[in-house]
Image: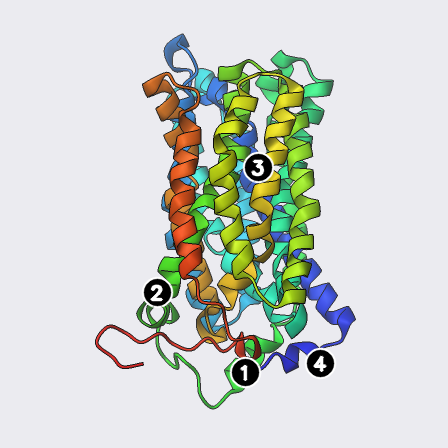
Amino acid sequence: MSTASATDVPLRVRRKAVFAASLGNFIEWFEFTLYGFFAAIIALNFFTFDGGEPSLVATFAAFGVSFVFRPLGAVVFAHFGDRTGRRTTLSVAVISMSLATFAIGVAPSYETAGVLAPVLLVLARLVQGFSAGGEFGGATSYMVEYAPKDRRAFYGSWQFFTQLFAGLCAAGTGAGLAAVLTEADLVEWGWRVPFVLTLPLGLIGLYLRLKLDETPEFAESREAPRSEAPGRTPILVALRDHWRSLVTLIGMMITGTTTIYMMQAFWPAFLVEQVGMRHSDMYGAMAAGIGANLVLIPLWAVVSDRIGRRKPFLVATPVLLLLVAVPVYWLLLQGEFATTLAGYLLVALAGSPMMGVLATAMADSFPTAVRYSGLSLAYSLAVSIFGGFTPLVLSSMVEGTGDLMSPAYYLMATAVVSVVAAALFREPVPDAETEAEPEPAPGRSS
């Protein structure tokens, strides 16, 4: 199908739909990233066993375990999203995330409940992971499917924009609490406040998403006489006919997802516990770095729409990260606000080109009938393997080797993989971006 149906939708309606999808996406990722920002405090409350030292490894293991459930959530949400529509599945995703985040905020500490405390925390994280598995594919589909043909990258860029804006707000929440509360109050009860307040946020997101209509591309695909997967499971069709795209997209995402979870989940605890920075300085540098990304991401998307290509931006990010990884970690290890700020800004400059175009490049790699499934599967697998366990891997590397520079070498290794994958990425045909053809299965002629 063409994008004419999306173009014919009044601008006011398109903006309202993208805003509602973005706001729900923001709520989801604000709730999900809170854990990483408060990792050091969560370690004190849930993983200080028998009066010993708080375990960051155990804390990050609980962070990472939620990602085991993300592919399962992706499969379940995507199945219904491609078969029955995007709206309902996205509504369920946002409210279940809010309930799980609220549960973390009211969970008893280890001192109060013993081993039950980390068990309840892990259960809530599993529900968060399941819910997050259905968010990316649905929200990205919604944004791109409402976009005019010549602004698809810009509309899709709101996916990562809202993710990082959610991170900025979570960092701002942490900085604000650290500024007005004593360290003892922040550890004892202050960290719980934003987790508890996510429940009303989730109710707002639920209301907004239930008021949405289905996207014009999805509605037209349901009425078309031919459908890529009539009566068949969309996730299986995506695996069978688009496996090459899945592999390429996962490879491209390795560096980006490692970088995001390194900055938002590993660095907060690393800079405070290992480097010795104050919470307020760490949050300030992080906020500035994320702010730089928020400026650059839509700008790169606009440039991509103007030139009609996305591959140069997909290649640029892993190449730049390969070059700046070691200098960035050298800057962080100085332990000063100015050098940490410089490190965050370098990563923002290197990572933003890909984030400006990646969501749309992924969406245009799959036809409408299996787009939710293809997006969800590629994203959840990449994030589950190379994102959620990034803090655990990096903290284990630091503890195991004693080398505070070791995370830089890990980032460089992921960048090499993403350079290769981006080089292999097949740019969609400009006049048929939403009609990605099935890839020939092994043994079939194309």
- Callout 4: helix, strand or loop? helix
Taking 228 as reference, is 342 above or below it? above
Q: Amino acid at mark 1?
A: Met
Which residue is pictured at 70% across the width and 17% down the height?
A: 181
Q: Which residue is mark 2?
A: 244
Taking 96 as reference, is 47 above or below it? above
Front residue of this view, candidates 182 and 366: 366
Q: Amino acid at mark 2?
A: Arg
In front of the other: label 1 or label 2?
A: 2
Front residue of this view, candidates 434 and 64: 434
Front residue of this view, candidates 16 and 419: 419
Q: Amino acid at mark 4?
A: Asp
Quadrant including the C terminus: bottom left
Disc ID at residue 1 = 1
- Colour mode? rainbow
In front of the other: label 3 or label 2?
A: 3
The location of residue 219, given as percent across then percent down, is 57, 79
Q: Earlier in the sequence, mark 2 or mark 4?
A: 4
Q: Amino acid at mark 3?
A: Val
Left/right of residue 279 with respect to residue 239 in the rendered view: right
CA gap, disc 4 and disc 1: 14 Å
Q: Which residue is mark 4?
A: 8
Left/right of residue 183 with respect to residue 379 in the rendered view: right
